Amino acid sequence: MDIRGKTAIVTGAGRGIGKAVALALGREGMNVVAASRTLKEVERTARELIELGVKSVAVRADISVMEDIDRLADTAMETFGGIDVLVNNAGVLMADGIENLNQRDWDLTMAVNVRGTAFLSRAVMERMKQNDESYVVNICSTAALGAKPEVTSYSVSKYGVTGLTEALYKYGKAHNIRVSAVFPGVTDTEMLQSADMPCTPDMLMKPEDIAYCVLFLLKSPRRMVVKEIVPWATR
């Protein structure tokens, strides 16, 4: 896929993996709609993209809120006239083992990681149908390949994103929309730090590692079908 001059929405683009992906796309000449719940952070990302010489707009959007989903998709269409790529990166991570599960954190995790990803994908894919070729990339997690009991709700939510990716993949084939998932290992992000997860530096991937995987998917030939990429962390 020739991505130069095309438009991407990246959620969770204010920091971490989302920001790394947004900047990587900008360096390849893509216009980027950078979305996040925190406007100040995502405005900084948009400024950095503009400094790279591409067009960008910052959108404050909480994908657990249906009105924000529609507004995000509409803003992309109104600003750039179309959407070619969606990178579903927004997510939350709670340090909630089985013994300390609580409904508030569980519901928030599912609302953002699963429901938000599903309904934003639906909204954007509906608008992508007019394109010759489009791509949806879901940022999943190796926690969906082997549940981690210390982050129970997160693991369950990423299993949900895995199933969602399969459904979107099958749906998208009829509309020239490719769909893939990337499964990062433990990655050095503020979200990980805020969850106070026990990690040593040599275990951690960098957000840029995941951005390279996304670029590989987007730039791969149409005849090359890739449903998932699993960049394991160093053990």
Image: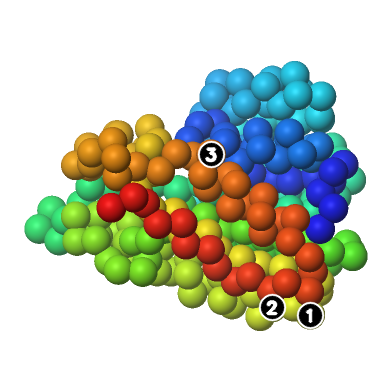
Q: Is 17 in front, or is 201? A: 201
Q: How many marks?
A: 3
Q: Nearer the viewer, mark 3 or mark 1?
A: 3
Whether pointer 1 and pointer 2 mark residues with C-beta atoms closer than 8 Å, the reply is yes
Q: Is 33 in front, or is 39? A: 33
Is 72 positioned to the left or the right of 147 in the image?
right
From where the camera sits, is residue 68 visible?
A: no
Identify the element where label 1 is drawn.
helix
Q: Nearer the viewer, mark 3 or mark 2?
A: 3
Amino acid type at circle 2 is Tyr
- At horizontal 89% and vertical 65% (from top left) the residue drawn is 132
Amino acid type at circle 3 is Glu
Q: Position of residue 235 (x, y in %)?
A: 28, 53
Residue tagged by mark 2?
A: 171
Q: Earlier in the sequence, mark 3 or mark 1?
A: 1
Residue tagged by mark 1?
A: 174
Q: Position of residue 93 (x, y in %)?
A: 34, 47
Q: Position of residue 199 (x, y in %)?
A: 23, 41
Is 223 positioned to the left or the right of 19 in the image?
right
Q: Residues within 10 Å of mark 3 (few under 14, many from 20)?
A: some
Residue 191 — which label?
Answer: none
**Label 1 – label 2 distance at C-alpha:** 6 Å
Give the quadrant of the N terminus.
bottom right
Residue 208 — which label?
Answer: 3
Whether pointer 3 and pointer 2 mark residues with C-beta atoms closer than 8 Å, the reply is no
Is 106 positioned to the left or the right of 138 in the image?
left
Whether pointer 3 and pointer 1 mark residues with C-beta atoms closer than 8 Å, the reply is no
Is 21 positioned to the left or the right of 108 in the image?
right
Identify the element where label 3 is drawn.
helix
Task: Check the image and name the residue furthest to the left.
Answer: 99
Q: Is 224 in front, or is 174? A: 224
